[in-house]
Image (cartoon, grey):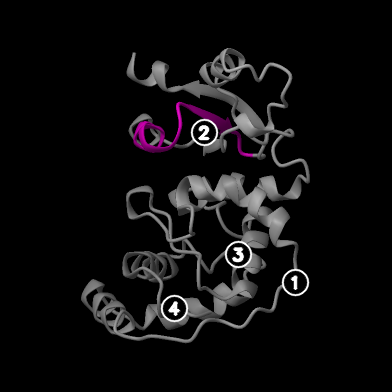
Amino acid sequence: PKTAGQHGWYIKRQLQALKDGIRGAAPGDVYGAQMRPMAMTLSNEAAIDNVVAYIETLSAPTPRVTVKGDAAVGKQLYMTCAACHGAKAEGNVQLNSPRLSDQDDWYLVRQLQNYKSGIRGSNPKDVYGMQMKPMAGMLANDQAIDNVVGILHVRDLLRAWDEGWGDAGIGGLLRPAVFVPETRTVAEVLAEMRTRAHVALVVDEYGGLAGVVPLEDLVG
């Protein structure tokens, strides 16, 4: 896949994971197995840093679109991904989430399939992969996590009532739902919610809805 334009810290982490056997050693990971010996030629951290530094100087044209899908449906499904990867898929180093925009679409599809099948995210040492695995698993469900499409705040409902919109539909009051895996720490979820929402929906390893965490419970 394309590497130019990806975050350097993420490239470094993946090269190290390949060297350590966290990636590229799982049964069925044909392409990871091809890449692993390449990564192992980098003898130490300094060598990895040098390669990453060079990649960061490179630029590449926008990848060609090869995957045909429904962008409107995809936008709704991506609301879950945006909690970590950003509204514009720009990535977030604080949440250890790489950039997704301007990457090869066929590679993104393959990696989502790898997470869903367990090729990635099953190694006990793959902390970040284990966080991603349940997120990818949700894409197997057309209802997108038990039909949850948004969050309705009581204060928004009361304000609409006070303004005379009692007979209007609630669709315009819904806020994007913020989904987090059970593996997230309190500090990570708190940082996410302070800027994006007052309620987080927690998903289990199978992509199902495990519970709800109000902001008040984290800071109370």
The quarter of the rendered structure image containing the C terminus is top left
Q: CA distance from mark 1 to mark 4?
A: 22 Å
Q: Secondary structure at mark 4?
A: loop
Amino acid carrying mark 2 in the image: Glu
Occupied quadrant, residue 13? bottom left
First to last magenta residue range: 190-205
Q: Secondary structure at mark 1?
A: loop
Could you tell me residue 149's position as x and y percent? 67, 36
Sequence order check, earlier mark of 4 and 2: 4
Q: CA distance from mark 3 to mark 2?
A: 21 Å
Q: Which residue corresponds to mark 2? A: 182
Q: Which mark is residue 68?
A: 1
| Nearest-to-viewer mark from 3 and 4 | 4
| Nearest-to-viewer mark from 1 and 4 | 1
Q: Which residue corresponds to mark 4? A: 3
Q: Which residue corresponds to mark 3? A: 111
Could you say which is closer to the camera, residue 54 or residue 142?
142
Sequence order check, earlier mark of 3 and 2: 3
Occupied quadrant, residue 190? top left
Q: Does 198 appear above or below 55?
A: above
